[in-house]
Image: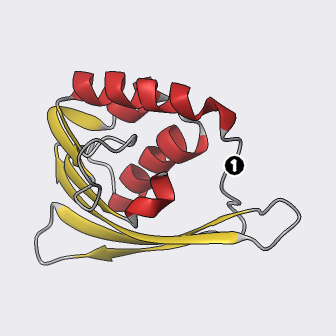
Amino acid sequence: MSRTPQEIFENYVYSGTVTRNADALAENFTADGVFEAPLLPAGAAFPRRLVGREEIRSAMAAYYEQQVKDDRSPNLEKSRYVLHTTSEPDVFIAEIDTVFDGDGEDDVAVSLVQIFRIRDGKIARLRDYFAPELMS
């Protein structure tokens, strides 16, 4: 049974952003899936390009381990997203506004766009467009 864009997106966000579970995140991708963050400079802490489910799994596990001191988590009640279907049935776009609670200060809002290319209910290619300074 094929998953809907909403099911794919929500599972991807839950396994990555919410729970930081690299194994679950990687299972959202095809065996040869590609994850890209094209706006990041080479050598950034967050991976710029990962090819294959196993590379996604290991690189994201290492990244999540580095980020253990960052206890920020998204405020799901304040965060919003809109999914846009395209003329290609295996492509959808996520327009996201994620809100992180501030430390007694104002909330921090992060806007980004992700382009998903799907094959057999899994992510074959994901391009994640966000401001590079967010990952420093």
**Label total for image:** 1
Q: Quadrant of the N terminus?
A: top left
- Classify mark 1: helix, strand or loop: loop
Instruction: Give residue 134's position: percent from left, percent from top.
Output: 49, 60
Residue at x-position 10% and y-position 70%: 88
User: Relative to 34, does residue 8 appear above or below in the rendering?
Assistant: below
Instruction: Give residue 115's position: percent from left, percent from top.
Output: 25, 64
86 or 16: which is nearer to us?
16
Q: Quick check: 44 left or right of 64?
A: left
User: Relative to 2, does residue 15 appear above or below in the rendering?
Assistant: above
The single residue placed furthest to the right in the displayed view is 104
42 or 23: which is nearer to us?
42
Q: Quick check: 79 left or right of 114?
A: right
Residue at x-position 18% and y-position 64%: 91
Residue at x-position 33% and y-position 60%: 5
Q: How many residues crowd mark 1 within 10 Å: few (<14), some (14–19), many (20+)?
A: few
Q: Quick check: 76 left or right of 106?
A: left
User: Relative to 64, does residue 101 appear above or below in the rendering?
Assistant: below
Q: Amino acid at mark 1?
A: Arg
Coloring scheme used: secondary structure
Residue at x-position 67% and y-position 69%: 108
Instruction: Give residue 64's position: percent from left, percent from top.
Output: 51, 31
Circle 1 residue: 72
131 or 28: which is nearer to us?
131
Instruction: Give residue 105's position: percent from left, percent from top.
Output: 84, 69
User: Relative to 65, does residue 80 appear above or below in the rendering?
Assistant: below
